[in-house]
Amino acid sequence: MRKNNPFPQKANPLLISLAVIVTLFSVCLSFILMLHNSIRQREVLEITDRYMVFESRVQRLIYSNVTLLQGYEAYIKLEPNLDAEVSYRYMDKLLSTNSDYIRNVGVLRDTTIIWNYPQESNAEAIGVDLSKVEGQKELVLKVKQELKPVLQGPVGLVQGGSGFIVRLPVVMEDTGYWGQIAIVLKSDKILEEIEAYAKNSGLDIAIYNQENKSVPFFRSIGFDANSQLEFAVDPEFINWSIAVSSSNGWTDSLLFVLLFVFSVCFCVFAGLLMYKYIKSNNKIVMMSTHDSLSGLFNRNFLNKYQTIVFAAARRKEYKLGIMLLDLDHFKKINDTYGHSVGDMVLVETARILKASIRTGETAFRLGGDEFLLILPEVEDVESLLHAKEQILNRFEGEFNIPGYPIKILPSIGYAIFPEDGGDLDTLLHRADTLMYLEKLERQASN
């Protein structure tokens, strides 16, 4: 069962404001992450759509040059013993108006180059067995074994420079593998077109060969793996992997940075407002229940407190004691030293009373130089008189106003519940009478 605590509870402004900051920041962060995921999903769809357009252009660029020579492949199948002169004339006619991207075309018998068009600039490559050339032998042998076309590159060429090589297997119906057609595409032209496609599609790209996915052979993008998508381009033929990100993706990053900074500022500002509110509220509570000068509880709080402690004393059948204090010659101190020193006397009195009471006992300033102590559990009158004696001893031994030769004693009246009365007013009347008699007795002795 919850105890009815009469004392006002002060909220901890620092802990509450920190809790507000953490809670609000969690909400803001959840919103930012939700927004990020939504934008990310939308961006993935947009980039994928743009990439599909980009990829189709790249494939069309490469396949159009491959298709150009598929007729030549059929020609060789019909005439496997075709001599070089006829072959070169055929290639002259075929590529006279279609050589923008094709650097040269080589024909391999098995894995050795037997023709290389144009002949003048590529004669030195004729007779080279590409199955023995590093950088080319793997795919040459792969085409021979698997009988599937493949694109390689960019690679260093035997005749110098670099290019993309499309290798088409030539397979005879009766004898099987005959050789290969190697189409060398101009790497600078192809990459120039690919860059234009990427720019038109609003994409940043980096292209890797599947054999080396750590270093791109064309362009590069940021290192943040979460900001990019990866696609494989026709892995059966074009052995590339393309990393893609939006060329204007940095604006989203800036948006999230701004949202994050705003959230932090907003949460801190809300926490500061909460801190100030709780501090002000605590101050209002303190002002309503405490005496502003002495820091003791005031008469307003006494009205609530007495109801609870008397009800508890009745329920538990405890004795309850009170002591009413009034400072002797306090008016004289005010008249002699001024009200500021009088206030110092009241503050010092409050200090002594706080030091004198035990846990569960409460001190009040009722007004002026009048104070009240409530002791919820006392055994008898003798214990109340013992507490009174201790208070007087503290005043005699500890009371001190720095810079002023002031010594003061309180007159103390007391009463005990239920012997002296059944409510606070009755007990106060009894204690006031005893206090007045003590004050008269002390004046008479002086």
Image: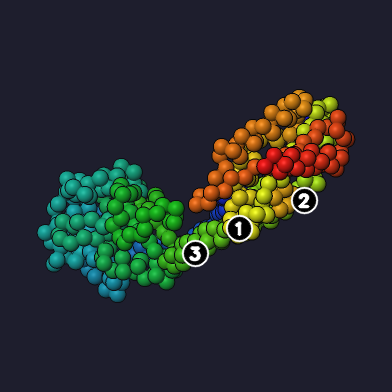
Q: Are marks 2 and 3 in contact (CB under 8 Å)?
A: no
Q: Is residue 184 left or right of residue 238?
A: left
Q: Amino acid at mark 1?
A: Thr
Q: Is residue 57 left or right of residue 25?
A: left
- On the image, numbered disc 2 is attached to which residue? 300
Res. 211 visible in picture = yes
In this rendering, the answer to whether 6 lies above or below 64 is above
Res. 23 visible in picture = no
Q: Nearer the viewer, residue 43 or 201?
A: 43
Q: Nearer the viewer, mark 2 or mark 1?
A: 1
**Of callouts 1 and 3, the N-terminal one:** 3
Residue drawn at x 16%, y 65% is: 119
Q: Amino acid at mark 3?
A: Leu
Q: Amino acid at mark 2?
A: Asn
Counting from the top left corner in percent of width and height, residue 301 is at 76, 48
Q: Looking at the rendering, in which quadrant would you find the C terminus?
A: top right
Sort mark 2 into few (<14), some (14-19) or many (20+) by Cα contacts within 10 Å.
some
* Secondary element at tag 2: helix
Q: Nearer the viewer, mark 2 or mark 3?
A: 2
Counting from the top left corner in percent of width and height, residue 148 is at 35, 48
* Secondary element at tag 1: helix
Identify the disc placed on residue 336. Answer: 1
- On the image, numbered disc 3 is attached to which residue? 258
Q: Nearer the viewer, residue 243 or 182?
A: 243
Residue drawn at x 58%, y 58% is: 337
**Of callouts 2 and 3, the N-terminal one:** 3
Residue drawn at x 67%, y 32% is: 389
Q: CA distance from mark 2 to mark 3?
A: 51 Å
* Secondary element at tag 3: helix
Identify the disc placed on residue 91. Answer: none
Q: Nearer the viewer, residue 360 or 187?
A: 360
